[in-house]
Structures are given as structure tokens and as C-alpha cells.
Image (cartoon, grey):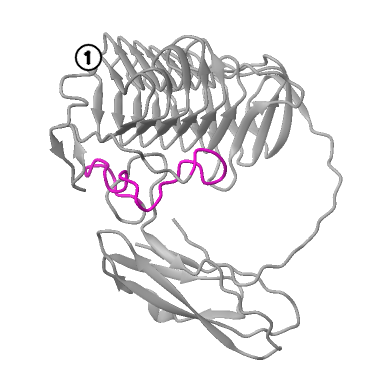
Amino acid sequence: MKQSIFAITAVLTICASAAAQPVIFGPLSGSLGPGTFIVIGNISVDSGDSLKIQPGTTLKFNNNVQFEVNWYLYAVGTETDSIKFMKNEGATAWGGIDFNGTADDNSELVYCFITGSNSCGISCNSSNPLISNSTISENTSTNGSGIYCASSNPTIVNCIISENIASDCGSGIFCGNSSPSINNCSISGNTASEYGGGIYCYNSSPAILNTVVEGNFGNYGLYLYSSANTNITYNDFYNNQGGNFSNPPQGVGQIVTVNANGDSCDIYHNIFFNPLFYSTTGDSAFYLTANSPCIDAGDPASPLDPDGTVADIGAYYFYQLIIEPEVLDFGVLDVGETDSLSVLISNTGIEEIIIDTVYNSLSVFTFDSSAIGAVIPPGDSLEITVTFTPDSSMDYIDTLYVAIE
């Protein structure tokens, strides 16, 4: 993960008129996007076909219009350019994304935003797609308003599943005869009228790892029925209406030991504390704050977080590298004049950090290159000097990136 420092902010006003948005319906194949498309009738990826949806694509669906995946779908956005599936302006709700029994198991939804469906955000029926780094929020249905799994084993990783509402069971995730892998997710604020505000499992054996299940409404955050083989390890369950569990495997939820952070937990290293999110709404939603008990509380056998520390619990890890100040403001300098300001890079983690590279774009800003390769022990800091020498009369803005090994 990269951290940035802004030097000077310039304001640019752009005026433009919007072009008409194209409409789509029926079977799709090949490549779609980027851009915004109005979906006026059901769309599909038919058997034997494939569809690649480009980053920066938005699909706006008319009332009750569905997306049926019967073969291979590759909808992979980026962290800064996601793919959005949502209802069109004026529509009440659309029909969600359905992975059917013929869907290719290599299908992917990555960096996607799925909202406004009245028939589950994502429905998996005898299918096993990858759902990663995505937000599934504010969908409704009878069961599994966020993600519905029937005889399916999808991989659900680094996802936000929030504010979904089910009139029956399992608002966040519903599992029937399924064994999904649920890793590093944040399942929060979902509502079920009957059972399992966060997750409901019937005759299923999901593996739930490094995941936060908190603040869900209904009977229990995790409701298990005939699902004794569920694997529940290194998670945080907190403040779920009616209780955290119904019918959990033996030992789950019984506080008998402490984890590596010294916090009380059960024998499976599940903790039961407020995850201390910055927020559950807005741009900072579900990011961990510095005092969160979820930091470094994940499975040590999981891949390390990108900052080189033990896996955190939840969809977003806490970046244990602090750069201060966040903004360098050099004020007004004459052309050819030089000024320098300092940046402090602090390691708040428990492992040493090695600076892999530091770089920026504009030649008027330079920095001390000796920082590259520097080792910052836990609790220590490194100072970098940034120098500004303007070469013309204008406003400058640049970003200084610091990447670690």
C-alpha cells in the first residue's frame, strides 16, 4: 500500500456537458466498458461465451432487470477504478447478479460495488466464483440479501457486506448446502427478520477466517443449523442483536485464553471486542483505528498484510506506517528560490520496515534518496527532507509515494 503527501493544492474548474449514456440488453460477450451503460432488459453471459467488464464501468439497471451468468465473467476493477452494479435513476430496484449452475468457476468479481437489488446482490447457485475486494450493500431479498449460496462454494475475501435487509434468514450471507470460504471480510449492519443477521447456515460448512461480524440485527450474528463442521477461527464477533452465535461448534465463544496481543479469546482465537472502525459510513467506513483489537489479531499462518505485519481481522488492514504531516505546504516562493520541509515516517507495527522506494513526479520537488533501503525498527521513525525549487510562476501539486518491502 502506498502513502501519499500533497505539497500544494491547485483548484481547477471543469465545465462539460454529459453525452447520452448507451443502453444494453440481451446476451453479452467480449469486452464492455469503460463508461456508464443503462441496462433496459435482462443481460446475460450465455453458455460458451465470456464477458470482460473493464475497470471504470458502471451498469445502471432498470426495475427488476437481472444479470444472468451462465459461463465466464471477468469483472475486475481496481482499487481506484471500481466496477459498479446499481439501480438506474428512477428505478425502485434491480434483480441482482445470478451465477447459475453452468457458470465457470473461474469467474471473478473484484473491486466491484453492488447495491440496490431486490433479489440478492449476488446469487450463487451450484457455482463457485471469486468475490474479492468488493462492497455488497443495501440489497434486499427473502434470504441472503448480500450473498446467497445454494450448493455453492464461492471464495469471498476482503469484502464489505453491509446494510442488507432480508425478510427471512441470513441478510449478509445465506449458506444452504454450501461451503464458502469467507476471509478478511467485514459483515456489519445487516438485518434479518428471522435468524442470522450477519450469516445464516443450513447444512453447510463454511470456513470463516479473519472476519468481523458486528452490529447485525436479527437473531444472532451467526446462526448455524445442522452446520456443526463450520470452521470459525481468528474472527471478531461483537454487538450482534440476540447474541453472536446460535449452535456454534464446541468451544466457539467460550473465553478460555488470550491471543498474541494479550486479549481474551476462545480456543479458536476468536475475539469479542468493538473493532473500533473509523466509521461504518462514508469514505472511511470499516477502516480500523490505531487502537483496534483487530490489528495483528488474525491468523499468523495467513499471508502477511502488505505492511509486513501479521494479518489483521476485517476487510481493511491497518497500515502500520504513519507519515506526518499528511500535507506539505511550501507557501509562495519566487522562481529559483529553494525551501525544504521534513516528513517523518513512523513504524507503529511490531516488525521492522524496510523502505523499498520513494518517488514523485515533478522535478521541482526532490527528496533525500538515502531513505531508500533504510530500515525502521518497531516504534522508531525516519525523517525525509523534501526540497521545493519552483521553475516557473504557477501552482504545483505532487504526490510523494513511500513503498515498503
Helix, strand or loop at mark 1: loop
Residue topped by disc 1: 228
For residue 155, above or below residue 334: above
Magenta stretch: includes residue 380 = no
Residue 296 x/y as whole percent: 28, 48
For residue 181, above or below residue 5: above
Q: Which residues are magenta?
A: 279-305
**Horizontal placement of 106 versus 260: left or right?**
right
- Residue 373, visible in the rendered structure: no
**Horizontal placement of 95 versus 1: left or right?**
right
Residue 70 x/y as whole percent: 53, 16
- Name the residue rendered at 13%, 33% in the picture: 256
- Name the residue rendered at 27%, 49% in the picture: 310
**Quadrant occupied by the C terminus:** bottom left
Magenta stretch: includes residue 302 = yes
- Residue 59, visible in the rendered structure: yes
In front of the other: 127 or 90: 90
- Name the residue rendered at 29%, 20% in the picture: 245
**Quadrant occupied by the N terminus:** bottom left
